[in-house]
Image (cartoon, helix red, strand yellow):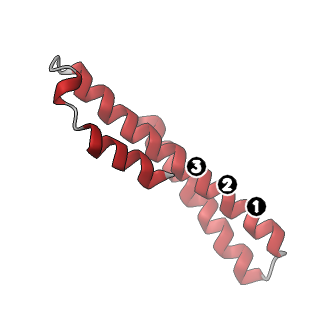
Amino acid sequence: MTPVVNRIKRARGQLDGVVRMLEEGRDCEDVVTQLAAVSKALDKAGFAIVAAGLQQCLATGDGIDSVDVKKMEKLFLSLA
């Protein structure tokens, strides 16, 4: 999970930058570009967390039958 935590911390820094840009009255295009980067970073972190959870479920030896497929699908779709 260390890479995920690092990615989220980096996104937090980017988001702080977006707030500063807005407060400084920076160009809308620049703000939106940075906001999109924050969004993508958070999406990637979310997918990594869900994937790690699925991998952990499968690694328990219980197999795919123990994985709540609907729940995992809902988690993935919540990030889409």
Q: Give how far across and how far down residue 33 sits, in percent.
A: 76, 61
Identity of the residue drawn at 36% across and 48% down: 75
Image position of 75 with respect to 15: above or below = above
Which quadrant, please, contains the N terminus? top left
Q: Give how far across and how far down residue 68 sits, in percent.
A: 22, 38
Image position of 55 with respect to 26: above or below = above
Q: Which mark is residue 33?
A: 1
Identity of the residue drawn at 42% across and 36% down: 2
SS at badge 1: helix
**Residue carrying label 2:** 37
Identity of the residue drawn at 49% across and 50% down: 8
Marks 3 and 1: in contact by CB < 8 Å?
A: no
Identity of the residue drawn at 67% across and 63% down: 35
Marks 2 and 1: in contact by CB < 8 Å?
A: yes
Residue 64 found in image quarter: top left
Specify whether 26 is left or right of 12: right
Please state which of residues 12 and 57 is positioned toward the viewer in this rendering. 57
Specify whether 67 is left or right of 23: left
Q: Which mark is residue 41?
A: 3
SS at badge 3: helix
Q: Give how far across and how far down residue 27 sits, in percent.
A: 84, 75
Spatial CA distance of label 3 from label 2 is: 6 Å
Specify whether 46 is left or right of 32: left
Marks 2 and 3: in contact by CB < 8 Å?
A: yes
The residue carrying pointer 1 sits among few (fewer than 14), some (14 to 19) or many (20 or more) residues within 10 Å by Cα, namely few
Image position of 27 with respect to 7: above or below = below
SS at badge 2: helix
**Given the image, on which type of amino acid does mark 1 rest?**
Thr
